[in-house]
Amino acid sequence: MITHAQNEPAVGTGSPAVNITVFAALIVITLYLTYRASSRNSTSDYFAAGGTFSGAQNGIALSGDFLSAASFLGIAGAIAVHGYDGFLYSIGFLVAWLVNLLLIAERLRNTGRFTMGDVLSFRMRQRPVRAAAAVSTLFITVVYMIAQMAGAGDLVALLLNVRSSSGQALVIAVVGVVMVLYVLIGGMKGTTWVQILKAGMLLLSVALITIFLFGKFGFNFNTLLQQASDNNPLGDRILAPGAQYGESALTKLDFVSLSLALVFGVAGLPHVLMRFYTVPNSREARRSVVWATWLMSTFYLCTLVIGFGASAMVGVEAIRAAPGGENSAAPLLAYEIGGTVLLGVIAAVAFATILAVVAGLTLTASASFAHDFYANVIQRGNADPDSEVRVARITAMVIGGVAILGGILVNGQNIAFLVGLAFAIAASANLSTLLFTLFWKRFNTTGTLWGMYGGLGSCLVLMLFSPVMSGAEDSIIPAVDFSLFPLSNPGIVSIPFSFLCGIVGTFLHRGKADPKDFAEMEVRSLTGIGSRGAGV
């Protein structure tokens, strides 16, 4: 969690004119693609693309949705500065998909229709559970979006060499407005095609950088690692675990907490879960996860090379001195390898990454509020489909505004770290209730509400009173100190606490869950009978 240095010597970032031209072309092309894909949107099209995508298409889109600025900019920067410990983010993100493949994807696709709230409320009281699902989704999405906004600000500030706080705030605001346009225009179908395009561009770009980088070192990885260690203040420590998380028992515990959040958080991320509704059946949902896992495995192996390559060729001091700090490592490496043109291309790809991810996040949050809260809580299931879409679009604008303000506040933090906090919230608020709903016959409405609100509340409170907010030089509010919880990531406490709350709430409830509802849900989740596009 490193903040970028101010008033440091400028780092070569190529021609702003070239960068702006590439950016403008990218925005025009993707907005046109979004418009063409979604010119006629029904409610089902807007929220779930009508379930028309194949497993391969959705798997590519899943990787595009998941490989965010944290994956490309944050992880590469963390590896460049901290070495092997930075790569632990990649391992956590990747292993997490096994949870989705084995436990969540198929059952979720068969049980729900548009949102996670459809599953959680299937055999529970509709209104309170859907309200809790909407609240959870909004909190997770906003924190995740704030990280992406900060990454967008860092990236554009680097390319235009904008170093003032007000200039970077303006950059984040403009980027945020463009991102919300994707959701207002396109819905899920348009957003999915943007994510497919972006995933292809991103994977091709990192593969080319990796090949070019290996060529610079005679295709000898040992030579690259040696120069990286020589060019890093930590020396050979970056080649082994412990440079960042092995200094004390507390940092080791912090690493365990972060790992729990990364591994279990993916299964609770609403924007990832919502993607399973864009395929016609559970077989395609499984294929989606397999495709996404292979594509992301390739990507994360490339980030390992890119991160050490940035340390070897750019240097830690130059990375920290650039606008964006650690998040600038990959673009600066591109400039060292291929000059202005390659930097412009890589920056455009990174920008497309942020655009696609934030569009998916905004769509998920607005869909949850419109479908779960407005249609089923306020309107009691009697909402007009057109009004549901209209409420979703208004919600998207509000969420975009909140994310812009949050991105300005946390500008300069490592975005991989910020995304780790979003994963902790997702694992704490959603994982226990999803698993209990799908697999525990006795689980009931009280357990659902206790688990969701208990996990969400504990995670947010621990974050508020942790070094993330205050008490350290790299805190969001460094001038004061009200930190009471010593760990930067609360997952080690809040995730087990959410499971405990779900269990206690279930046993304290006087009534018993209807076994017929569970039997119906089990048959539907396993076979797809009764769901849209039944079949395995």
Image: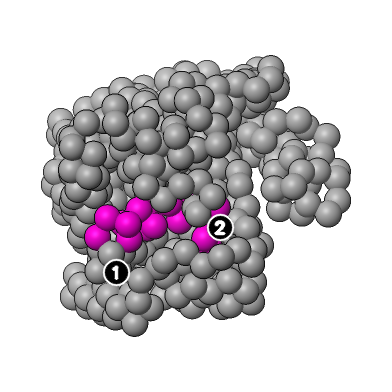
Residue drawn at x 36%, y 26% as measured from the top left? 95
Q: Nearer the viewer, residue 253 or 12?
A: 12
Asked if one can make out residue 208 in the rendered structure from this viewpoint, the answer is: yes
Residue 325 forms part of the magenta stretch: yes
Answer with left or right where residue 209 lies relative to residue 270. left
Question: In the image shown, does 507 or 246 lie closer to the viewer?
Answer: 246
* Image coords of residue 303 (percent x, y): 33, 40
Amino acid type at mark 1: Thr
| Three-letter code, disc 2 | Ala
Residue closest to the eye, 114 or 58: 58
Circle 1 packing at 10 Å, graded few (<14), some (14-19), many (20+), is some
* Residue topped by disc 2: 321
Q: Which residue is mark 1?
A: 340
Query: Residue 304, position in %: x, y?
Result: 34, 36
Q: Is residue 58 above or below residue 334?
A: above
Please provide percent x and percent y for residue 460: 69, 42
Separation (CA) of disc 1 from disc 2: 19 Å
Q: Main secondary structure of the magenta part?
A: helix
Quadrant position of the N terminus in the picture: top right
| Image x and y of residue 234, in percent | 54, 32
1 and 2 marks in contact (CB < 8 Å): no
Q: Quadrant of residue 269?
A: top left
Q: Where does the magenta region start and end? A: 320-338
Q: Residue at x 46, y 47 (%)?
A: 315
SS label for mark 2 = helix
